[in-house]
Image (spheres, grey):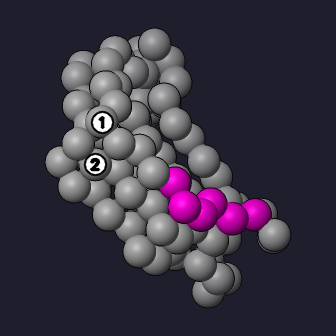
Amino acid sequence: ASTGAIKLMADKNGSYVKNLFVDNCVFENIGNMAVEVTNHRFDGIERFSNLVVQRSTFKNLGLNEVKTYHYGMAVSYSGLGSNVIVDN
């Protein structure tokens, strides 16, 4: 278990993540994060929007053996975006 379950990167010009809906899912035995969405351009453009994670279960996260990647977060949104909801 050395990776995340869902990782979406909107870090390049013209890339966007929109209308992601994760509902009633089970994330178990994951290397890093269960759900990760990034926008690391830092140019003032919102590259993700309308993201929902709800009624989901997170068990045994952060199994990656490399300490620098040993996070174990359930959900991570990083960078400029809008209308993000986590409701468990």
Dot 1 amino acid type: Asn
For numbered disc 2, what is the local secondary structure? strand
Residue 8 tag number: none
Q: In the image, 41: left or right of 36?
A: right
Residue 54 tag number: 2
When asked about the image quadrant of residue 48, the answer is bottom right
Q: In the image, 13: left or right of 9?
A: right
When asked about the image quadrant of residue 83, the answer is bottom left
Q: Is residue 2 above or below residue 79?
A: above
Give the residue at the far bottom of this rendering. 44
Residue 24 tag number: 1
Q: Is residue 17 magenta?
A: yes
What percent of the width, then of the height, locates residue 3?
A: 52, 24
When asked about the image quadrant of residue 34, the answer is top left
What percent of the width, then of the height, locates residue 67?
A: 39, 26
Residue that appears at 34% across and 50% down: 53
For numbered disc 1, what is the local secondary structure? loop
Give the residue at the far right of this rendering. 14
Q: In this view, does 27 lie above or below 50?
A: above
Q: How crowded is mark 1: few (under 14 residues within 10 Å), some or many (20 or more)?
A: few
What percent of the width, then of the height, locates residue 20?
A: 52, 54
Span of residues in magenta: 15-20
- Quick check: can you spot residue 67? no
Q: How crowded is mark 2: few (under 14 residues within 10 Å), some or many (20 or more)?
A: some
- Depth order, front residue of 50/45: 50
Q: Is residue 44 above or below residue 66?
A: below
